[in-house]
Amino acid sequence: GNFIERFIERFLEMVEDKDSEVVAKAVKVATLFIRHDLLKDDQGSTIPALLWDSDEKVSDAAAEFIHADTFEIDASDMKEKDKNEDDLKELVELFNDNFPQLNCDDTMENRAVAIEKMVSKLYDDLPALQDTKLLTSALLSSSTAKKKGKDAFQSWNEAQLQTLAYVLLSSIKSACGIDYDGSSKKIDEEIVEKKKTKITKIMVKEMPKLLSTFEADNTIIFPLVQIPQYLNMEDFSSGKEKTFKQMLHCMKSIYLKHVKTSIHEEVIKTLRTLSDAAHDLAEHAEHFISELATILVEQLKAHDLENTQQDEEVLESIKVGVRRLNTLLKHKDCAALIELDYRPLQKKYLTESDEEPELGFGLLELDYMKSMWKLRSEEKKSKELDAMVQGIYDNIGHMLSSADVPNTAKAKASQILSSLFVTSVSALIPEPSSGTKAIYCEFVENSLRNAAKNPETLDVQFISRAATLAAVYSFFSEIVHTLLSYYLKIGKGYDEIVKRMISGMRKQEDATIAPSAQLGALKMIYLAEKKNNENEMEEDDGDHEDLERKTARSKKTLKEIAHKFCLMHGFSGSFRNFLREGAEFAISNGADFLDAILPFAKRSTEKDLRYIYAYLVREQKKSLLEEEEDKKVDSFVQSIKKVIIQKLKKSKAAAKAMPPPKASTKKTRDKDAEDDKENQEDVNDEEMEEEEVQGSNENAGKGEEDEAAKEPKGRTSSTRAGRRSKRLRS
């Protein structure tokens, strides 16, 4: 064969390279091979799955390959409608054949995400995805053919129908300029509006049919109920009232028929969109929401909520009803319609029994929803609201301190608690007690401790919320050190949470908050490691060599965390309090801790370094340190001295490089003389480099100690396999 044919296999091997840049270019070359008919049917089989690669360049290149391999065929003898139908079936089979290769759990949630990315990547170049009429007809005709037992082209299996439903939703979102990750595509707004109008005119007629046809199917109905959220509601007006009401009736029926919370969420989002939009029929949607709330309340009343001796079937029905009601209240204020006395049940399943934690939490969440809507509507403090909130605090405290309540329920309760913490700043509701705060902090620490052992247990949403609040509100300062102390111990996801928390602290007016919090965390880490090492030595019958190894490992970990902390907070200015507090802690608890403040010392000003140098020299003379500890302190002092000398040399070199100063006025000469007098103890850089640094720093330290005391301290690559190919199937 020719040169290219001899090296095709090598090019295809590069598709498996670890470097994303190499992979993207290799896929582009493979696309050229496809278009010039140089690949055999069994070559390039790993490329289609790269469409779902996390690297955008690789994903885009794979999309182009798929289009060339599967959809760029000679269709001169086919009608456009037939070509689109053929491409649609190819697309569905492409997904169902490749999804098992994506190295993720086969859940409908993961499938939905993957379908959305596939559609987003192929939408612009695939007319079948832009044909909304074809997509809806395929779903409806397939269902009809299935019912009649016909083996029509559109009569697909259940998995294909589920994929097709998500393809329909994803194609509508793409037409509206929404990318697979939720961001907006760079498309002209006028073009987007034209597409939305065109799609809406089709969906006005088809939406009621789709909803009624697949009303009972959990999986297919989920994407379908979301579609109205992306339509132009104005196009439902003028003569479309009957169709609009049919759609509302279907939504209500779906809401009351299904038990999955995810379906309830999307139905209410859609109803809210329909009621909030500026169109003539919005009042009908508002009426349906109120009617839905009334039905739910009546259903719950029928179960006699004051009776605490309910059988399992009734309890399950109550749980579903409470979930539906809570979902509705998240999006619409219907609190005034909810007159239920569920205190006996709530008391039993929150404070007296842990048999039904889900029901207990559901009733707690109902309390929270009602209190927030009451606060929003009245916007003033009231005894009734205070009593409601205090009851919520007490119940959450019980949940968090109970060993029988699952952590998932505790995390949800903590989310409610953190929201109330923030709202209490307004003084419209009472603040949580110190006991409630302590229970919350303990749960955060337990969650982090478990995540350090098993990172998969980390509840990212809950911990992110705690970190965000800790960065902003002073009454969360108790958990700041705990959150920081688990840095580099859980995984990259958690480390990003910590970085965002530090970033939030940096935005506060008090610039010492971030470094003070970091110092507190470093102290906590140091003491914890020291205690663990001592306990392990006792268990090992005093093995000193083992203790030395563990201590060295702990020091390395502490230095690494300190170095990362120093780089992330971006603090520039006086580190004097930080260094002084760190040095005091080291002298009292162990000189090894000085390694943790050294990275910060290297970024300090020369003035602060002189201060801490003089302080440590005096402490060495005053304190009766053991010989080993004294050596460590002395080593740190010498490191500080070296940093001072380096800064002096750098300043001197910079001064020589500066242009000669302009003639000074009498005022500037007087100011310079005053500065020289004030800093005379710092003069003679040459001597500083050898002998004078110690005496000079002692003077500086004595003169500045009182000043320091006055300063505010502040609070401390995817699996690549599988390919759809017409040539392969043929």
Image (cartoon, rainbow, N blue to C red):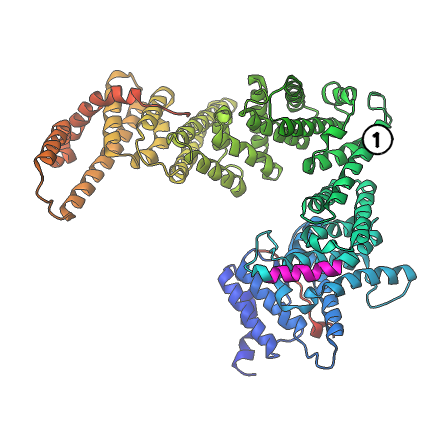
Q: What kind of residue is marked 1?
A: Glu
Which quadrant holds residue 592? top left
Residue 559 in the image, given as x and y percentages of width and height = 39, 35
Q: Is residue 193 highlighted in magenta?
A: yes
Q: Nearer the viewer, residue 660 or 603?
A: 660
Q: Where 269 sits versus 549, above or below? A: below
Answer with left or right where residue 702 lies relative to residue 575: left
| Residue positioned 73% across, 37% down in the render | 328
Q: Residues within 10 Å of mark 1 (few under 14, many from 20)?
A: some
- Residue named by callout 1: 298
Of all residues, the one furthest to the right in this rendering is: 148
| Residue positioned 52% across, 59% down in the render | 18
Q: Quadrant of the C terminus?
A: bottom right
| Residue positioned 84% across, 52% down in the render | 212
Element assignment for label 1? helix
Residue 121 in the image, given as x and y percentages of width and height = 61, 62
Residue 713 in the image, given as x and y percentages of width and height = 36, 24
Answer with left or right where residue 727 lies relative to residue 553: right
Region rendered in magenta: 191-203
Q: Where 90 sits versus 566, above or below? A: below
Which quadrant holds residue 377? top right
Question: Secondary structure of the magenta portion, mostly?
Answer: helix
Residue 62 shows up from this direction: yes
Q: Is residue 523 highlighted in magenta?
A: no
Q: Quadrant of the N terminus?
A: bottom right
Residue 543 in the image, given as x and y percentages of width and height = 46, 26
Residue 107 shows up from this direction: no
